[in-house]
Image: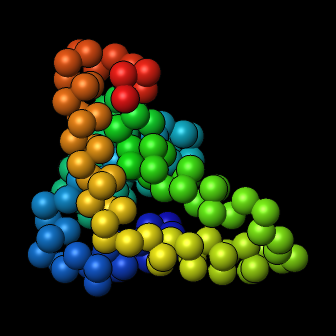
Amino acid sequence: MNVLTRFWRALGRFCGHEARGQQWFMQDGAAPHTARRVLTWLTDHFEGRVISRFTEKTWASHSPDLNPLDFFLWGHLKDQMSGEQFQTLNDLKSLVERLIRAVTPEQCEDTIQHFLLRMRRCVQRDGGHIEQLL
């Protein structure tokens, strides 16, 4: 629960506390993510605006197509880390943090535009797989 609490505080600092009242939380259906305690915490803090397994709004079956972290950030970080050497877990964490901070506003805007395209394709396919269409 400490991770969620730190995330919640950071979200408030980043987006403003009043903006949190409009945001949705989306996650996959992995067992640790859908434990009753976790879902209760998320539902309470996001006032029911949670997309996950075992919630009112369920996780889309082909959701990696709809998640900017899956279709942009993880691949981008992997590309940037190619060939990097690190000796400790802290070195790895520092590298990942530095690379995330280096993501530009333009890259974020491009990702948002691509996300909108993915959403339109998903609607056209009635929720079906869309990766081959992009």
Q: Position of residue 51 (x, y in %)?
A: 30, 42
Q: Position of residue 19 (x, y in %)?
A: 14, 71
Is 20 situated left or right of 32 in this image? Answer: left
| Relative vertical location of residue 40 with respect to residue 15 in this rendering, above or below | above
Is 91 situated left or right of 6 in this image? Answer: right
Along the viewing direction, whichever of 105 and 69 lies nearer the viewer:
105
Q: Position of residue 115 (x, y in %)?
A: 28, 44
Along the viewing direction, whichever of 102 and 48 lies nearer the viewer:
102
Residue, x 54% and y 56% (percent of image)? Answer: 76
Residue, x 38% and y 72% (percent of image)? Answer: 104
Residue at the far right: name it: 87
Residue, x 29% and y 34% (percent of image)? Answer: 118
Q: Tell how many labels.
A: 0
In the rendered image, the quadrant that contains the C terminus is top left
Quadrant in the picture for residue 105: bottom left
Is 63 situated left or right of 73 in this image? Answer: left
